[in-house]
Amino acid sequence: MRVKTVNLAEIATGFSGEAKVASHYKRLQRFFRDFEVDYESIALMVVKVMKIPEPWVISIDRTDWQFGKTVFNVLTLGVVHHGVAFPLVWIMLDKKGNSNTWTLEKIEAKNG
């Protein structure tokens, strides 16, 4: 909680020890390179921590952000609690615009 950000370059400045900040940064990159998100665990944790009662209200949202020439198109499934949608599952779409049946089948196949 020293650096209050999720930027790896900033997090690297919060490590203690004799190593240089660049070394800490590379260590973080190696850790996250093979890190896989367990969506089911995240979803269960969100529902439990937020104490969201059933029946759940589910939201589906697609948004895109552009940074320079790079477009990030994200399809998100969330659970709504007190008017706020908490994301549970998301997928990066590999095309511009809205999702389609193929995309939904891809999500189902990925999540079993």
Image: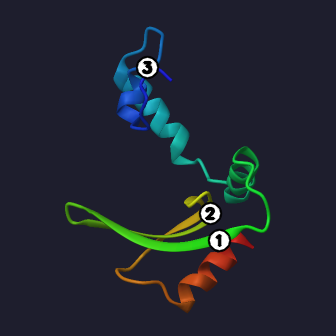
Residue at image coords 64%, 64% = 79
User: From mark 3 to mark 1, how far is it between C-alphas?
Assistant: 37 Å
Q: Are marks 2 and 1 in contact (CB under 8 Å)?
A: yes
Classify mark 1: helix, strand or loop.
strand
Residue type for callout 1: Ile
98 horizontally vs 43: left or right: left
User: From mark 2 to mark 1, how far is it between C-alphas?
Assistant: 6 Å
User: From mark 2 to mark 3, how far is it between C-alphas?
Assistant: 34 Å
Q: Quadrant of residue 94?
A: bottom left
Q: Which mark is residue 84?
A: none
Task: Looking at the picture, tell me which residue is in the foreground, 20 or 95.
Answer: 95
Q: Position of residue 43 (x, y in %)?
A: 70, 57
Foreground: disc 2 or disc 3: 2
15 horizontally vs 111: left or right: left
Q: Which mark is residue 58?
A: 1
* Few, some or many residues within 10 Å of mark 3 (<14, 14–19, 20+): some
Q: Which mark is residue 80?
A: 2
Lower position in the chain sequence, tag 3 or tag 1:
3
Residue at image coords 42%, 84% = 98
Lower position in the chain sequence, tag 2 or tag 1:
1
Task: Looking at the picture, tell me which residue is in the foreground, 59 or 104.
Answer: 59
Q: Are marks 3 and 1 in contact (CB under 8 Å)?
A: no
Whether residue 72 is visible: no
- Give the residue at the far left of this rendering: 68
Q: Position of residue 2 (x, y in %)?
A: 46, 20
Residue at image coords 36%, 29% = 10
Residue type for callout 3: Gly
Q: Position of residue 34 (x, y in %)?
A: 57, 48
Report which residue position mark 3 lands on. 14
Residue type for callout 2: Val
